[in-house]
Amino acid sequence: MDGFVNLNKPCGLSSHTAMARVRRLLATKAGHSGTLDPFANGVLPLCLGKCTRLAEYITELPKSYRGEIIFGIATNTYDKDGEITEQLSCDGLSQEIVTAALDQFRGTIMQVPPMVSALKFQGKPLYELARRGEEITREPRRITIYNLQLIKADFNLDNPRIILDICCSKGTYIRSLAYDLGKAVGCCRTMAGPFKLSEALSLEQVETMINNNDFCFILPPSYGVAHLPVVTVKGEKALSRVKHGNEIPLKNASDIPLCRIETSEDELLAIGQITSGILKINKVLVTE
């Protein structure tokens, strides 16, 4: 069974646990295309069968989130589930101040990942070190915030709250963004590449459809890589060369650093590239 599932992960479950439940229900190989924090809900694209080999092409795509931030409270995990480490007065804080501060987070910026994260230090996840009370210096990483929009704000509270819409690059921690701007209380992923929250299915919906032998929710392999330019191959000889990972010379072809290779019937065969008139195969997805 090959394809994608646009899953709406609920709060309280890790991405791995949510993926594992669908994997057991379908009895097939499965993976996900980027971890969503346990406290967050929203789009979690699942890759089934051979499409697990396409996950890397989805994780590179921009992602969108809606996050809520509360000012004046800091936690050790940068989110609402952590232990409170600091409480500060928010007297004088206004929407004008916050709106002005948002400008420094737009575009390409450097961000320090949170200590409680799956990033590894000397082979160990940082969250394991954090549980032991260890604090490791984390190197800032370059990320891009494509869009950062204030949706709603309430500054009449002792701890003002705002809601932001964020579109960002791979590797962005919304918790760190929230920590740098205020103190995080939760967020929802609304988009991951072509996978949209409005079209995502809950675990309960997926389970019901599987029990009814209805698998129409599984999106075709080409869905997850539709952002890549397509190269169509025709003829048994060309199809055989692609299936065996062999190069194919092309006439008058422009260089393409990454493309999807399909049949004339839109069946995804492989991922490849065109260099100097040669179609090179990077990853084969079909067999004889």
Image (cartoon, rainbow, N blue to C red):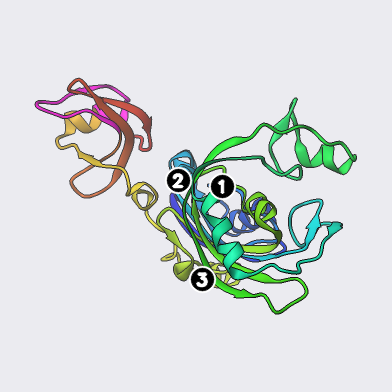
In this view, the residue farthest toward the left is 252
SS class, disc 1: loop
User: Which portion, as a residue range, is magenta?
Assistant: 241-257
Real-space CA distance between mark 3 and mark 2, rounded to the nearest whole angstrom: 25 Å
Outermost residue toward the front? 92
**Location of residue 216 (image quadrant):** bottom left
Query: Residue 185 falls in which quadrant of the image?
Result: bottom right
Location of residue 283 (image quadrant): top left
Question: What residue sits right under mark 2 in the picture?
Answer: 58
Position above or below: 273 against 64: above
Q: Report how far apart the C-alphas of labels 1 and 3 lie in the structure.
A: 24 Å
Up-down: is 199 above or below 13?
Answer: below
Residue 209's tag is: 3
Going from the N terminus, do you reach mark 1 or mark 2 first?
A: 1
First-in-chain label (1 vs 3): 1
Residue 252 highlighted magenta (yes or no):
yes
Residue shown at 49%/66% (left/top)? 197
Q: Position of residue 249 (x, y in %)?
A: 17, 22
Q: Which residue is mark 1?
A: 34
Q: CA distance from mark 1 to mark 2?
A: 8 Å
Q: What secondary structure is marked by label 2?
A: helix
The percent position of residue 74, horizontal first and vertical second, equals 79, 57
| Viewer-side residue, 138 vs 273 | 138
Q: Is residue 247 left or right of residue 184?
A: left
